Image (tube, rainbow, N blue to C red):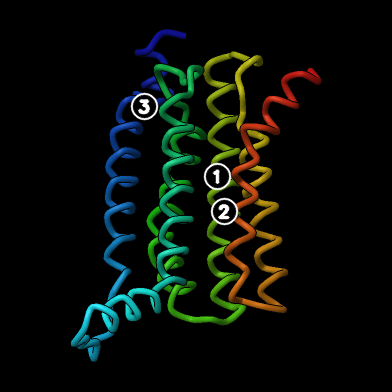
Amino acid sequence: MSDAVKQAAGFVPTRRLEALTDAVFAFAMTLLVLNIELPNDFDPKTTHAFLQGLAGLSDTFIAYLITFLVLVAFWSGRAQATYEPEMASASYARATLFHLLWVTVLPFSMLAVSRYNVAGAVWLYGANMILLAVTGILISHAAKRDSGRDDASDGRIEFGLLIASAVLSMLVSLASPDYAMLAYLLNIAAPFMRRVAGRGS
């Protein structure tokens, strides 16, 4: 199918979606750091008091780092994809736009989980992560279908680990919201699991 026929059928140039994706990720990453705020009544008189105040933001810093690293992983996964079609079908475009929707919600989810030490905030954040992973899977499947390449990696391991860590975080939050975010450290195992899966196939 020629590019002209694809455009007439509702396909859009993939480069347009890539430009939008880069812009949304950059904006979301910038918004994350704006959620790290010292309290309005914070007025340290000594270096020790200042450092104590920073230590009080440890939950916020942890949420920020985890969220930033997740965004980096999603962005780099899209940037390194070698099977992207030149023209994107309507289903590919829709999956990308829904994915970007959940990227834009992530700064709010991070704000909630860093400010409120309750299970509900962890669940909101976890749901956001799961929706990011699900829409990432939809993008991968649409890209494989549009490019006609069945041998392309679909990120199953990375997305599966993100979903598993989000569910584990939600479960941990029922007992201790303080430690729930540590479940996302499971995602560090993704490269190891990818190597193991590569040997098995």
Q: Which residue: 61% across, 76% down?
A: 177
Residue contact at pointers 1 and 3, CB within 8 angstroms: no
> Cβ–Cβ below 8 Å for labels 2 and 1?
yes
Q: Residues within 10 Å of mark 3 (few under 14, many from 20)?
A: some
Q: Where on the picture, by quarter, is residue 170? A: bottom right
Q: Which residue is mark 3?
A: 12
Q: Whole-percent x and y of residue 172?
A: 70, 70
Judging from the image, what secondary structure is the residue with disc 3 in? strand
Secondary element type, mark 1: helix
Q: CA distance from mark 1 to mark 3?
A: 19 Å
Q: Which residue is found at the position 45% from the left and 24% from the top?
A: 80
User: Which callout, 3 or 2, points to the residue nearer the camera?
Assistant: 2
Checking the image for residue 131, the label placed there is 2
- Amino acid marked by disc 2: Leu
Q: Which is more foreground, mark 1 or mark 3?
A: 1
Residue with the most extreme bottom position:
41
The secondary element bearing badge 2 is classed as: helix
**In percent of the image, x 46 and y 63: which residue is there?**
62
Dot 2, how many residues are within 10 Å of its Cα: few (below 14), some (14-19), or many (20+)? some
Q: Position of residue 2 (x, y in %)?
A: 41, 8
Residue 50: x and y, percent?
26, 79
Q: Which quadrant is home to the C terminus?
A: top right
Q: CA distance from mark 2 to mark 1?
A: 6 Å
Closer-to-camera residue (141/108): 108
Task: Say left or right for 67 vs 13.
Answer: right
**Image: 196 above or below 48:** above
- From this viewpoint, which residue is outermost toward the right? 200
* Mark 1, residue position: 135
- Could you say which quadrant of the image residue 200 lies in? top right
- CA gap between label 3 and label 2 equals 24 Å
Q: Position of residue 137 (x, y in %)?
A: 60, 38
Determine crowd level at label 1: few under 14, some 14-19, many 20+ residues with C-alpha closer than 10 A: many
